[in-house]
Image (spheres, rainbow, N blue to C red):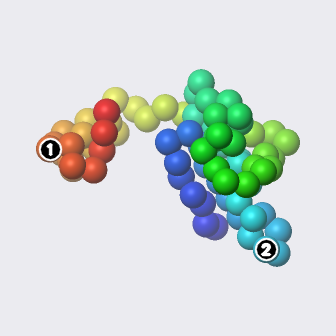
């Protein structure tokens, strides 16, 4: 399955044309926040999933081990 992961939520292709629809949100983000950043009328799945915040160990690995200079990840 293909997905587009953003800093606000997750979009997935839907239907034969592959239109991207909103399927999940991060905590504190509303569908309108995502809509503001796209150039089309965004459709949402009826029951949007919530993306869990990353665990402290995951953040340590990403920030301190994989990208200690902050070249790719911004905090």
- Quadrant containing the N terminus is bottom right
Identify the residue at image location x=14%, y=44%.
Answer: 69
| Residue position marked by numbered label 2 in the rendering | 17
- Please say if 46 is above or below 56: below
Q: Could you say where residue 13 lies in the image, as x and y percent from the top left?
A: 71, 64
Residue 11 appears left or right of 65: right
- State which quadrant residue 19 falls in: bottom right
Identify the residue at image location x=68%, y=30%.
Answer: 30
Instruction: Please name whichever residue, 4 or 53, is drawn nearer the observer in this view of the structure.
Output: 4
- State which quadrant residue 65 falls in: top left
| Residue position marked by numbered label 1 in the rendering | 69
Q: Are marks 1 and 2 in contact (CB under 8 Å)?
A: no
**Label 2: element kind:** loop
Which one is earlier in the sequence, the residue at label 1 or at label 2? Answer: 2
Q: Could you say where residue 24 lies in the image, as x and y percent from the top left?
A: 66, 43
Residue 35 appears left or right of 62: right
């Amino acid at each position: 399955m293909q997905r587009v992961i953003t800093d606000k939520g997750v979009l997935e292709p839907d239907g034969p044309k592959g239109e991207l629809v909103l399927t999940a949100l991060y905590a504190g983000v509303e569908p309108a926040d995502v809509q503001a950043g796209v150039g089309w009328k965004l459709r949402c799945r009826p029951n949007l999933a919530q993306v869990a915040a990353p665990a402290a160990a995951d953040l340590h690995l990403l920030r301190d081990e994989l990208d200690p200079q902050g070249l790719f990840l911004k905090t």
